[in-house]
Image (spheres, rainbow, N blue to C red):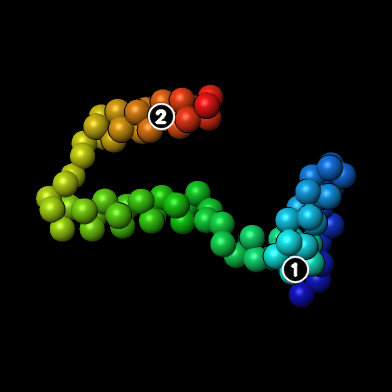
């Protein structure tokens, strides 16, 4: 497979290389592994839909879109509060 060139700030490259080194990997290997573990938006949506279906089957939980939005907003609020600490 041919390599690709990606232009990123030097500081970002250095940071990623340092993280890779602590895991005993080259930057190339680390980025390849990272790409394999991250989900695309479509994959995340599919996973969320599977989780909702499992919850509904398991305990009947089936939030409405409005309830989902409220829960998402509450999660965003809590994450923002945690980041402020």
Label 1's element?
A: loop
Instruction: Reply above or below: 48 against 64.
Output: below
Q: Residues within 10 Å of mark 2 (few under 14, many from 20)?
A: few
Question: In the image, is 5 to the left or to the right of 30?
Answer: right
**Could you say which disc has been placed on residue 25 in the image?**
1
Please, which residue is most extreme toward the left here? Answer: 60
Question: In the image, is 17 to the left or to the right of 56?
Answer: right
Label 2's element?
A: helix
Report the front residue among 52 and 83.
83
Question: In the image, is 73 to the left or to the right of 83?
Answer: left
Q: Position of residue 8 (x, y in %)?
A: 82, 45
Report the front residue among 45 and 25.
25
Q: Is residue 58 visible?
A: yes
Residue at point 75%, 68% (across, down): 25
Q: Is residue 69 visible?
A: no
Residue at point 73%, 61% (across, down): 22
Q: Position of residue 12 (x, y in %)?
A: 79, 45
**Could you say which disc has been placed on residue 78 in the image?**
2
Q: Position of residue 7 (x, y in %)?
A: 84, 48
Q: Residues within 10 Å of mark 1 (few under 14, many from 20)?
A: some
Tell me whether circle 1 and circle 2 mark residues in contact (CB < 8 Å). no
Q: Position of residue 37 (x, y in %)?
A: 56, 62
């Amino acid at each position: 497979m041919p390599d690709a060139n990606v232009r990123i700030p030097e500081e970002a490259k250095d940071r990623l290389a340092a993280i890779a080194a602590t895991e005993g990997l080259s930057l190339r290997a680390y980025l390849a592994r990272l790409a394999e573990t991250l989900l695309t938006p479509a994959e995340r949506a599919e996973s969320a839909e599977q989780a909702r279906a499992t919850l509904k089957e398991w305990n009947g939980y089936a939030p409405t879109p409005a309830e989902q939005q409220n829960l998402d907003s509450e999660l965003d609020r809590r994450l923002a509060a945690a980041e402020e600490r």
